[in-house]
Image (spheres, rainbow, N blue to C red):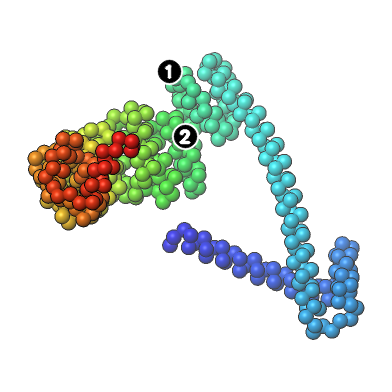
């Protein structure tokens, strides 16, 4: 069941429950107004009851017939007005109280953070002090936050000391516990902590979340393994069965470059049951110019998934895999227009006699986009040769004018 369906069900159920309670309360309130029970109760209820009775008298008279509509409806109106006023007052009070509380809590937290930061710095520069034991007594969440913050600004021996202090305080166990929390925001926060503090001993825990139903946690776990697993950085791709988003692909690429992560032979992931993994592998092979297993890329031109086939063609173009020429020509007639356009682009880049002969045979096409791709991607010399040997039409003339116009970008 989709999340929005669950939300609709929960919202509807909540609305029905609230309305039932309000209507029941309104009925009880009406009976209370017309009864004299409040006379025997405390002074506040007595005053309230008399006030409501006076309002009733003012609007509908002393002894109105009980069966008239206003006599029945007016108590309900009073009830909902009272509930609304009390709700507004309560909400305003709650918001003010919450703001005051958060302000006080923030000031206390900042003071505590300053103390913790000083203790950590004292330990780094004066290891013989007693601050180690003092840090044990501080709130772990605040200590971890400050250590992660400081770790991002120091290098060398001090950075190693900070990592050792982290483990000596057994904060890695706390992080592991929080990663296994039932709350997704805790999982996300502490997977990032494990990554920032280079806690390679937590790899086996993080691996459990590469297929998390929550995409925030899933993406964080995958990026974390890419950084932490120094020997098998990309092996998690064999376990991923959920779709890898384009955003995640970009993040992985930037992380590989930024952290100088040794690249794997990505061709071994081309036959993954997860099509998004195959697409990622194709993109990475193109980015890092891995041509050694180009025959595996060519085989994907027969893949059942349109997106995998399209990415394989893009990789063939990017890596200039001329061995794919015959396969591209054979599959061309039965492909979608978008694949045919990429095929034309690939053949134009190959610039071989067979490729040029095939493009000539396709021109002029009934499809404007195919005509445009052929003329656009051919080299200048090849374009002149092809155009001199084909029959022109209005589409070809228009495209040639556009290509030859130097003012157009």
Residue at image position (83%, 76%) is: 34
Circle 1 residues within 10 Å: few <14, some 14–19, many ≥20: few
Q: For the N terminus, which image quadrant? A: bottom left
Image quadrant where residue 101 sits? top right
Q: Assign a secondary structure to mark 1.
A: loop
Disc 1 target residue: 156
Q: Position of residue 6 (x, y in %)?
A: 49, 62
Residue at image position (23%, 54%) is: 367
Residue at image position (11%, 45%) is: 389
Residue at image position (86%, 76%) is: 60
The numbered disc on residue 361 is none
The image shows residue 160, relative to residue 382, as above or below, that is above
Image quadrant where residue 373 sits? top left
Whether residue 252 is visible to the viewer of this picture, yes or no, is yes
Whether residue 349 is visible to the viewer of this picture, yes or no, is no
Q: For the C terminus, which image quadrant? A: top left
Decide if residue 70 is on the left or right side of residue 239.
right
Q: Are marks 1 and 2 in contact (CB under 8 Å)?
A: no
- In the depicted view, which residue is nearer to us: 35 or 395? 395
The numbered disc on residue 193 is 2
Q: Assign a secondary structure to mark 2.
A: helix
Decide if residue 356 is on the left or right side of residue 289.
left
Label 1 vs label 2: CA separation?
A: 19 Å
């Amino acid at each position: 069941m989709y999340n929005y369906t669950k939300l609709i069900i929960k919202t509807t159920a909540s609305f029905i429950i609230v309305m039932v309670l309000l209507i029941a309360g309104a009925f009880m309130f009406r009976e209370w107004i017309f009864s004299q029970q409040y006379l025997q109760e405390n002074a506040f209820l007595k005053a309230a009851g008399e006030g409501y009775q006076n309002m009733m008298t003012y609007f509908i008279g002393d002894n109105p017939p009980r069966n008239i509509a206003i006599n029945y409806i007016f108590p309900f109106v009073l009830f909902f007005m009272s509930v609304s006023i009390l709700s507004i007052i309560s909400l305003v009070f709650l918001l003010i109280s919450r703001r005051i509380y958060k302000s006080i809590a923030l000031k206390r937290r900042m003071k505590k953070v300053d103390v913790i930061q000083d203790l950590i710095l004292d330990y780094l520069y004066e290891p013989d002090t007693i601050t180690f034991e003092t840090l044990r007594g501080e709130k772990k969440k605040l200590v971890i936050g400050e250590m992660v913050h400081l770790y991002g600004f120091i290098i060398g021996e001090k950075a190693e000391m900070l990592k050792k202090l982290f483990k000596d305080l057994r904060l890695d166990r706390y992080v592991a516990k929080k990663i296994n929390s039932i709350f997704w925001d805790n999982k996300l926060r502490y997977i990032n902590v494990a990554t920032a503090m280079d806690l390679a001993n937590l790899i086996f825990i993080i691996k459990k979340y590469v297929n998390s139903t929550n995409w925030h946690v899933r993406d964080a776990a995958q990026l974390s393994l890419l950084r932490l697993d120094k020997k098998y950085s990309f092996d998690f791709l064999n376990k991923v069965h959920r779709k890898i988003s384009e955003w995640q692909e970009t993040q992985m690429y930037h992380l590989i470059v930024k952290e100088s992560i040794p690249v794997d032979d990505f061709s071994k992931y081309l036959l993954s049951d997860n099509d998004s993994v195959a697409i990622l592998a194709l993109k990475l092979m193109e980015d890092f110019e891995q041509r050694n297993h180009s025959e595996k890329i060519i085989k994907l031109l027969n893949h059942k998934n349109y997106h995998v086939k399209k990415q394989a063609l893009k990789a063939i173009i990017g890596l200039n895999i001329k061995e794919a020429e015959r396969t591209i020509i054979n599959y061309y007639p039965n492909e979608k227009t978008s694949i045919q356009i990429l095929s034309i682009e690939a053949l134009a880049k190959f610039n071989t006699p067979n490729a040029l002969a095939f493009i000539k045979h396709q021109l002029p096409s009934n499809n404007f986009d195919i005509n445009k791709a052929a003329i656009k991607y051919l080299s200048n010399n090849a374009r002149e040769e092809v155009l001199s040997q084909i029959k022109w039409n209005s589409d070809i003339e228009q495209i040639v004018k556009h290509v030859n116009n130097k003012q157009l970008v």
